[in-house]
Amino acid sequence: MSKFKIFVATLLALALAAPAMAFDVKIKGDFNNRFSYSTQMDLANGDGRISKDGEDYLSEIPLSGNFSTADTKKERGDADFFGEAKYRLSMTAADDEQKVKGVLAFEFGGDKYGQNLDFGGDAKSFLEVRKLYTDLQVPFDPASRLVLGLQPVGYNKFVWSDLAAGVKYKSNRGAFGYSLGWFRDNTDLADDESDETDVFALDLTLKPSDALKVNGFIIRRDDGDYLGPNTGSRNIEHWIGVAADGQAGNLFYGGTFVYLDGEVTIGGFDVDRKAWLANLEGTMKTDAAKFTAGWLYSTGDDDPADSDFENYDAIDIYTGQLGSVVIFDSYADDNTTVGTPYIQDKGLNTVYLAASLDVTEKTTVGANYLWINSAEDLVANDDIGSEFVVRASTKVTKGLTAGIAAGYLLGGDAWEDD
């Protein structure tokens, strides 16, 4: 509540200090109700569906090296159905010249019907502040801006694409742009500064033409609270990467390569980390159809007991672009099996295909196929299986869209016990 009062007072102070300045206030909302049915609850993680035997089969279990295979035999009670509500509301206030902008955004819910949304309207929904930042033009340099507060970080989609509190300085010089960022996380409320997590980032972008963009970046994370407060553990990671996106007629293409190195300290022992990720994707668009083919690979660790970590790691990303329903993010993203470009610490090797067709101006149908493997064996094998997806969406009215997606996983040998 105090932060909200400070924010409002700042807007009033700015308005009073410059009475001739006009402010434009925009309010936007994303009001989302989704429903999910699964025949196999055992494909679960601790953030969404909870597996009935308490195991996490495909979600990440850092450093453990202990994995389970799900009992995929259909049993009574394995099925699960839920409804869920997630409402997001954002307010943006900016002057008429866009020199100063303040953004405040909330998320209500992510709650299942009957969980925090009880009979009688006695809702105890979780309230999350998603954005709380000021974006201002640097007075002595109109080509540069300074962003302060809880903001979208906007870095590579396979490293970090979520929200964080910090400071970002960004500048655009014609075809060349760059940004410098510092962000901090202290979720355990550690008293010792050495237990805090700091992220530093340098991001460079070059657009030699309207049809090509090249991006390079270096991101450093110093996590002094790796295994919990006052544990003496530390995780230092460096992501060094390059990505390119381009267009040639109706063909849109892109690629990413990221190298990760670092060092993990646990109980006085140092372990080196070396890993990498690669992604290639191409999309062909016509007036009514779109076809996509892609490949994503991230390295895994073949021996948790040796002296190095070879598994790729990300900070916080979204994997919905893969088009999965059973394994990766889908409509019900808070209840996904895997929300990372890797399976536990065994990496990922997957080919994904997608096709969509605009049947009418309002209705689109599509299908996806994913051949999903871990880079290293989970228990006895790396073949997780083939996922087949069909989907459809339609614009009911202005601002209201309804969609459905159904996926079927034809399981591979990775589900078998060794």
Image (cartoon, helix red, strand yellow):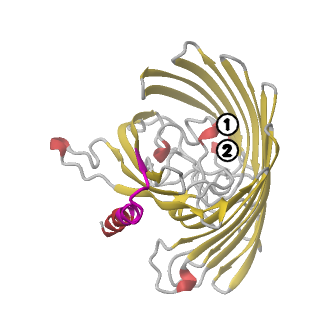
Local packing at callout 2 (Cα closer than 10 Å; few below 14, some 14-19, many 20+) is many
| Residue that protrudes farthest toward the top in the picture | 360
Judging depth in this view, the residue of 213 and 230 nearest the camera is 213
Task: Please tell me whether mark 1 sits on a helix, a strand or a loop.
Answer: strand
- Between residue 312 and residue 237, name the one nearer to us: 237
The answer to whether 206 appears left or right of 322 in the picture is: right
Q: Decide which of 340, 29 is in the foreground and name it.
A: 29
Q: Is residue 239 left or right of residue 416?
A: right
Q: Which residues are magenta?
A: 11-26
Q: Is residue 16 magenta?
A: yes
Residue 257 seen in the current view: no
* Residue at numbered disc 1: 385
- Residue tagged by mark 2? 414
Q: Amino acid at mark 2?
A: Ala
Which picture quadrant has residue 371?
top right
Alpha carbon of mark 1 to alpha carbon of mark 2: how far? 8 Å
Name the quadrant containing residue 199: bottom right
Asked if the residues shown at circle 1 and circle 2 are in contact, with their CB atoms under 8 angstroms apart, the answer is yes
* Kind of residue indicated by mark 1: Gly
